[in-house]
Amino acid sequence: MTIIFPRVVCAYRATMPTTAHYQGEHKVSGVVRNFLKKTKELMLTVTNHQKEKIKNGKWKEYNKRGVLIAEGLFLNNKKHGMWREFYDHTGSIMIEENYENGISHGRFASFHPNGKVLSEGNFIMGQRVGYFKIYDEHGNNASNLYFVNDIQIEDTIDAV
């Protein structure tokens, strides 16, 4: 796994295991792949990921080919705010989801590999509520699912 750390406090460029202190609150060990002096971002390949403290702040994850696969914020070791996940092979958007203290809360959207919306709806404290709309690869509304307290009440199929 490769992680980007913005605003690194201390980093040592080496080909041997290296430690980076992330904003003074998160410590991981791994091999430094790249350190961008201009933005002070550190790309670290983690071989022995040790959580010693709570994750807080911006977080980016990359696959082994360097393609961004997830980004968002952590607050007290929990996802918080907008999170985006990307297709591993292309890096195009796969999911946009809002979190509140590690629980899905707010707008959710998933996407087809071509970038068109696959589904969209809302969560309130981890439960689906209201309509979740499902779309085909061309963006046509194919189905509408209605939820109350995470229980599907209705399924309306639209003619395409």
Image (spheres, grey):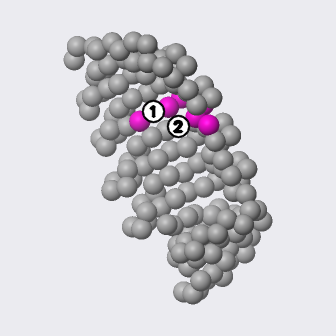
Query: What amino acid type should be assigned to the residue bearing mark 2?
Result: Glu
Tell me how far mark 1 sits from mark 2, CA to CA. 6 Å
Determine whether, in the image, residue 48 is placed left or right of residue 7.
Answer: left
Q: Is residue 102 above or below residue 54?
A: above
Q: Is residue 39 visible?
A: no
Is there any visible trace of residue 155 in the rendered image?
Answer: yes
Residue found at x 73% / y 57%? 54
Give the left or right position of residue 17, taking residue 63 as reference. Answer: right
Q: Residue furthest left?
A: 160
| Residue type indicated by callout 1 | Ala
Seen as rendered, the residue at the extreme right is: 24
Q: Position of residue 134 (x, y in %)?
A: 35, 25
Q: How many marks?
A: 2
In the image, residue 109 lies in the stretch drawn in magenta: yes
Secondary element under disc 2, as helix, strand or loop, is strand
Q: For mark 1, does the 10 Å Cα neighbourhood hold few (<14), some (14 to 19), or many (20 or more) residues? A: many
- In which quadrant will I find the C terminus? top left
Residue corresponding to mark 1: 109
- Residue 102 in percent (x, y) is at 64, 42
Q: Which of the 4 image quadrants contains residue 24?
A: bottom right
What is the magenta range? 103-110
State the image coordinates of residue 111 (x, y, percent, origin top left): 37, 37
Determine contact: label 1, label 2, CB under 8 Å.
yes
Q: Nearer the viewer, residue 74 or 117?
A: 74
> Looking at this view, is 63 or 116 the one in front?
63
Q: Indicate the secondary structure of the residue bearing disc 1.
A: strand
**Which disc is residue 97 wearing?**
2
Question: Residue drawn at (32%, 38%), measured in percent from left and top?
Answer: 112
Whole-percent x, y for residue 77 in the image: 68, 52
Disc nearer the start of the sequence (1/2): 2
